[in-house]
Amino acid sequence: MKNLIADLNFGTLRGFGPLGLENKQSSDAMGIFSNFISSAIGLITIIAIIWFVFIFITGAIGIISSGGDKGAMESARKKITSGLIGLVVVVAGIFVVKLIGLLIGIPNILNIGQLFTEIAPSPAPP
């Protein structure tokens, strides 16, 4: 019996965006890892922004549809406030990590590739 699924040609499957493996400029492992971490942080930030917009819209609809009910109004206001606090925490997290790096003496803490080359022990002299 012939397997029809095995005969299907889907072409080349590619991921979403440059996650590090599609970048031909950096062929070393540190460059790929650094690109991946940078893209992951950016993707998480974008997801947090989209989630905040969703929470903000549902909270605004809750305020509009509350009809004067104080409990529904307060619930919608808390939803918007918690969404805003979450967005501020996500965005401020990047700046907090950068500040901690500056305080402990690692100015490029968000540049993973350079960080690993600075941390790596130097080879022993011959």
Image (cartoon, helix red, strand yellow):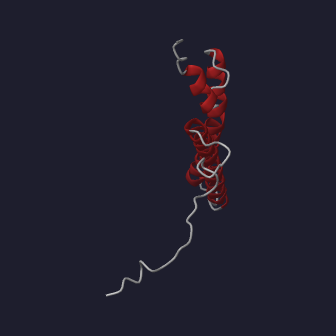
Measured as percent of width and height from the top left, residue 42 is found at: 64, 44
Image quadrant of residue 83?
Answer: top right
Q: Residue furthest left?
A: 1
Q: Residue 115, relative to residue 45: is it above or below?
A: above
Residue 61 visible in the current orientation: yes
Q: Residue 126, relative to residue 44: is it above or below?
A: above
Residue at the spot x=67%, y=21% of the render? 107
Q: Residue furthest front?
A: 126
Measured as percent of width and height from the top left, residue 126 is found at: 52, 12
Left or right: where does residue 82 sit relative to residue 5?
A: right
Left or right: where does residue 73 sit relative to residue 5?
A: right
Q: Residue 16, relative to residue 117: is it above or below?
A: below
Residue 82 visible in the current orientation: no
Q: Residue furthest top?
A: 125
Q: Nearer the viewer, residue 19 or 28?
A: 28
Count how many numbered circles sit on residues in the image: 0
Residue at the spot x=61%, y=32% of the render? 113
Residue at the spot x=31%, y=87% of the render? 1
Measured as percent of width and height from the top left, residue 124 is found at: 51, 13
Measured as percent of width and height from the top left, residue 82 is found at: 59, 43
Q: Nearer the viewer, residue 71 or 13?
A: 13
Residue at the spot x=55%, y=39% of the render? 29
Image quadrant of residue 125?
Answer: top right
